[in-house]
Image (tube, rainbow, N blue to C red):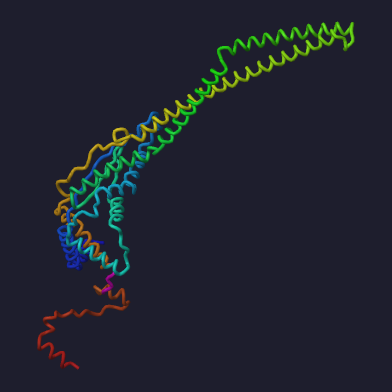
Amino acid sequence: MTPRDIAIFLFKWKWNILGTFLFTVLVTTLTVYVVPPSYDSSAKILVERNLPPVLRTLPGPAMDLAEALNTESEILLSRTVMTAVVDRLRPEDRPKHETTMSRIVGSVRDTLQSMGLSNPVDPREYWIESLQRRIRVKPTIDASILKVSYSDEDPEWAARIINTTLDAYIENHVRVFSVERTSELYKSQVDMIGKQLAEKREEIIQYKRRMSISAMEDTRRELVRQVGNLGDEIATTQSELGALLLRYEYGHAEVKLKRAKLDSLRERREAARRRLGQLEADQEHLDALQANISSLQDSLRDYTKRYEDARLNETASAATVNVSAVDRATVASRPNHSRLFYIAISLLAGLPLAVLVAAIREYFDQRLVSSAHIEEVLTIPHLGTVAELPRAVLRMPALRRNRGASP
């Protein structure tokens, strides 16, 4: 396309380009005066990824920076946090600032709902979903910082929403990373093990008192000695009985006495063995009680430590977690952009938009504009051109009479 073609194009569509440009600037100017200005409030959150989410005795492995920031962003924008913000501030009850635009939007919404084309939304639910969409969370490049921002036509309200969101987010962070009611479970285990330990200790005290443990070892040694002596006597008596049987019959009086003595010795040895076995069983029971008490003591120490850790987790606060507010939101003193800024944008963007509209119209324009174009479309030679007379000439009386007299 030559400069001449460009000039012809611009001259041909000059009124279209000028009209589109002026329309864009006019609409933008009216809009910036009708729509209330927007005020932006922001805050910054520090995420220390090398620390555990809540204060614990043993910190867990550190998360990757991107993983930590994405996790905290999802927690901040969660429905739980937004619900807490809405329930605390109750934005659905705040005084409404009626503007022309808000009245138009409200009228359109009511019309659509009355026609059944749109479903009514609960104000509380509307605000929860609106905050999830409108609150922006952006991580800072190469830094463990999250920037949270929100825009509203009321600067004080925007700051209140951001600060309330920070408080609700930190509370939800603690709740997510703390195991609720774990301390109660560990406390019940500590109480149960402590009760069992006290019962076992009382049992072993009563057992030792009943069995006279201080004399058990002496009694055991005495019984072992008795069993040995009785064994020797039984062996001697058996030898004497054998010698008597070589001289006398089984029915002889001396043989009967010796056999009675042998039976008595065997019964005494058996009784001593039974007592010795009972003492050994008592000692094994005592050792088992001691081992059981040692095991319960170890379990009590373990569950006591877990209970203390769980209590520490559940009492975590903003000072004991790995996230904290670096900057809290303040009330903005001026809107995000002035009206002049938007008008200047419309001036810069209006001209390319107007040229684009003209180019589209040119593309779809099928009118014949030159003799060469006529020959190209009709494929017949061009013989001549009759100029179009101006309308003022056509209105002249003489010309109209001549036109009426012509056959």
Q: Quadrant of the C terminus?
A: bottom left
Q: Position of residue 175 (x, y in %)?
A: 35, 40
The residue closer to the viewer here, 162 or 342, is 162
Q: Could you say where residue 235 lies in the image, as x and y percent from the top left?
A: 78, 8
Quadrant housing residue 388: bottom left
Q: Is residue 96 above or below residue 112?
A: above
Q: Is residue 364 magenta?
A: yes
On the image, the x and y values in percent for residue 265 come to 75, 11
Placement of 14 over or under 164, stated as above or below: below
Q: In the rendered image, is residue 55 in sight?
A: yes
- Horizontal relation, residue 394 to residue 316: left or right: left
Q: Main secondary structure of the magenta part?
A: loop
Q: Is residue 53 magenta?
A: no
Is 140 placed above or below 295 here?
below
Q: In the figure, is residue 161 to the left or right of 267? A: left
Q: Identify the residue at image location x=52%, y=23%.
A: 203
Stretch in magenta: 363-367
- Out of 75 and 94, give the one closest to the viewer: 94
Residue 170 location, quadrant: top left
Q: As drawn, which residue projects farthest toward the left?
A: 397
Left or right of 268 on screen, residue 294 = left
State whether residue 290 appears in this view.
no
On screen, residue 313 above or below 100? above
